[in-house]
Image: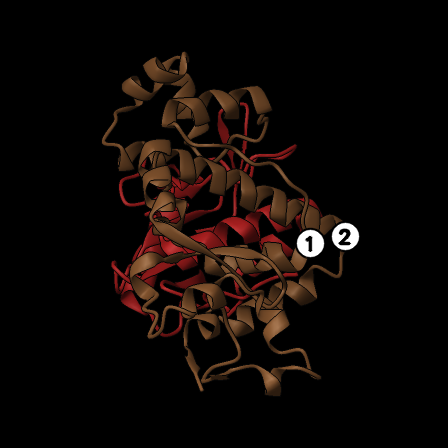
Amino acid sequence: MRFRLFDFVNCHGKNEIKSWTKELQKKELAKLNAKLDLLALHGDDLLPDTLANTPTPGVLKLRVHGKVQLRPMLCRGPIDIFGEYTLLIGAFERGGEFDPSKADQIADERKLEINRDPTNRRCKHERVR
Amino acid sequence: MNEFGKTLCSEFVDKDYAHAYMDQFYDMTISAQIKALREQRGWSQEELAQYSGMKQERISTLESGDYSAWTMSTLRKLAKAFDITVKMSFDTFSKGILDVVNLRREKLQVPSREQDLSRFNECQLVSDFNGEWKTVEATSIEPQNPAMTIMISFRSTDLFDADNWRSMPFQVSRAQSTQAVCSLTLK
């Protein structure tokens, strides 16, 4: 893989991304994994539109279309901005609104927490099957 | 990469998962290829829209990686604009896994008809062990003897027939690829 993927870990040591992903339906999960694999293999070089900006600078949303619109949010880095992405929060988009609302702002706060303690506040992305 | 391929193989035990994954992958790949082909030709989205008879907004949507309602009509319009052919075929999931792990930007680029046929015309056609015809750059074939030109037209499977190959009037230095046909030396 060309890029490393990480998941946000909360202050209790729980992988928040894994918890969110485990609740997804099988088809949604497959689509999400396909997008994440492409991201890990090629970054957003092949498909720049794979990642879209959110109202919060530095926080990106991964768009996965389907019956449910998945919008996990992530950032480049934040430790090595050229070689890694970190998934910050699992989210959906319904009627133009994020669920949870302010997901992008929560993601930004989590990014800061990772910057303060990268060793404990993130882990290698755990693939859910 | 091998580990990743094995991961997909184990995940694809689930039929619904496998189909959803590959559908998503090929949707993204065709979007990426449209963009790669356009950029290979140095065209803007507006130019591709003009050549294909579509609107720029439509091209943007097709390149977004989120489009999944592909039609043959749309793909043929784009193929004609790029002056390339479009192929639709069914295949195995193992081939799909190989497509995932082998995806490269340069593989998405395709030369236009004129460039391609000009190059094709300069190549030799040789047959591999499965009897499939492949192109070989003419410059890579350097017969040491005029008889070699005859050898090149042999099917490689013929050359290695268990009962006959020892009596053939040549030696084989490599026996695992199409290259073997080109590296025969007369005894």
Q: Using the numbered discs, state the Cα–Cα distance from disc 2 to disc 1 in whole angstroms.
A: 13 Å
SS of the residue under disc 1: loop
**Chain ID at mark 1:** B
Residue depicted at 71% across the width and 84% down the height: B163
| Neighbour tally class for label 2: few under 14, some 14-19, many 20 plus, Cα within 10 Å | few
Q: Label 1 sits on what residue type?
A: Thr
For residue A86, say whether it is visible.
no
List x then y, in percent, for residue A61: 41, 41
Image-quadrant location for residue B116? top left
Above or below, comparing residue A26 to residue A102 in the picture: below
- Seen from the viewer's position, the closer of residues A65 and B7 is B7
SS of the residue under disc 2: helix
| Neighbour tally class for label 1: few under 14, some 14-19, many 20 plus, Cα within 10 Å | few
**Chain ID at mark 2:** B
Image-quadrant location for residue A68? top right
The residue identified by callout 1 is B92
Q: Quadrant of the C terminus of chain B?
A: bottom left
Residue depicted at 39% across the width and 12% down the height: B55
List x then y, in percent, for residue B130: 63, 64
List x then y, in percent, for residue A40: 42, 59
Residue depicted at 33% across the width and 55% down the height: A111
- Seen from the viewer's position, the closer of residues B155 and A9 is B155
Say which colour chain B has: brown
In the picture, measured across the screen, residue A112 lies left or right of residue B128, that is: left
Which lettered chain is shown in red? A
- Seen from the viewer's position, the closer of residues B85 and A59 is B85
Q: Label 2 sits on what residue type?
A: Lys
In the picture, measured across the screen, residue B10 lies left or right of residue A56, that is: right
For residue A14, say whether it is visible.
yes
The residue identified by callout 2 is B15
Mark found first going from the N terminus, 2 or 1: 2
List x then y, in percent, for residue B88: 61, 36
